Image (cartoon, rainbow, N blue to C red):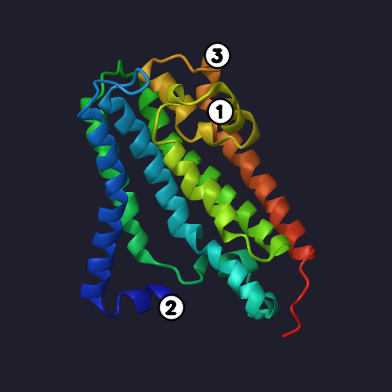
Amino acid sequence: MWVRSGLTYRTSFLITTFGNLTMTFMDFVGILLMFSQVDSLGGWSLPEVAFLYGLSVTSFGIADLLMGSMDVLGARIRDGSFDLLLVRPAPVLAQIGADRFALRRLGRIVQGGAVLGWSLTAVDVDWSAAKVLLLPVMVLSGAAIFTAVFVAGAAFQILAQDAAEVQNAFTYGGTTLLQYPPSVFGKDLVRGVTFVLPLAFVNWVPACYVLGRPYPLGLPGAAAFASPLVAAVCCALAGLAWRTGLKSYRSTGS
């Protein structure tokens, strides 16, 4: 229904999609402005940072397309309309994900994919079969990790009743963090996004393997291939958190 609604006015859809693409590209413009003044950022060249950027934005874009409507959950709980979703013969999580589904978010995926494609032609990498196969694994695993963060954030909104901005700090804030090399951040922050909230497995850890760089925390080389396992664990924990949140939900009574 939301897809058909969005495509009713084709010109408006194209304009908003292009606008979404342009706004997200401003982040990369900021990186380009930095490199207009320096030759490297934390020891990483522009193509290498663009590689991180493309992976982060593309993975997040896929998750945002599927689950980006999770931030409306708090409003639904406050006005009592969340109860309507509970009595419908469809999974509540699927209904929330489809709520106000916006194809214009494809602009973020297109923009991230374009930067990623350019970085692959410019970066200096000794390609092997393992590294080539790791690229799509990184994108899909990263999307799954971000999806898990969206779902866990939605579960927290059920408990807090209004915590969309807290969720955004880990979703939108997380993808912004991953656009820059880990070497520019403190060790404690890198440890946190590696072992506590494992966003580092979206791109930092596998990208270091692809680019032939040592990871700041000295992880073994095999960790680069752990992204699918990390994504599976994150999704399982997010699913558990979501079910716990639903069980603890108390209607507003409106």
- Which residue carries the number 3 mark? 218
In the image, taking residue 127 as reference, residue 234 lies left or right, namely right
Cβ atoms under marks 2 and 3 closer than 8 Å: no
Q: Amino acid at mark 3?
A: Gly
Instruction: Give the Cα separation between the discs numbered 3 and 1.
Output: 15 Å
Q: Earlier in the sequence, mark 2 or mark 1?
A: 2
Residue sitting nearer the eye, 72 or 185 = 185
Q: Residues within 10 Å of mark 2 (few under 14, many from 20)?
A: few
In the image, taking residue 188 as reference, residue 35 lies left or right, namely left
The picture places residue 209, in percent across and down from the top left corner, at: 43, 19
Q: Amino acid at mark 1?
A: Ala
**Camera-side mark, 3 or 1:** 3
Residue at 29% across / 80% down in the picture?
Answer: 8
Indicate the quadrant containing the C terminus: top left, top right, bottom left or bottom right.
bottom right
- Which residue carries the number 2 mark? 1
Callout 2 secondary element: loop
Q: Residues within 10 Å of mark 3 (few under 14, many from 20)?
A: few
Q: Amino acid at mark 2?
A: Met
- Which residue carries the number 1 mark? 226
The picture places residue 150, in percent across and down from the top left corner, at: 56, 53
**Camera-side mark, 2 or 3:** 3
Q: Quadrant of residue 222?
A: top right
- Disc ID at residue 118: none
The reply to whether residue 89 is visible in this rendering is no
Cβ atoms under marks 2 and 1 closer than 8 Å: no
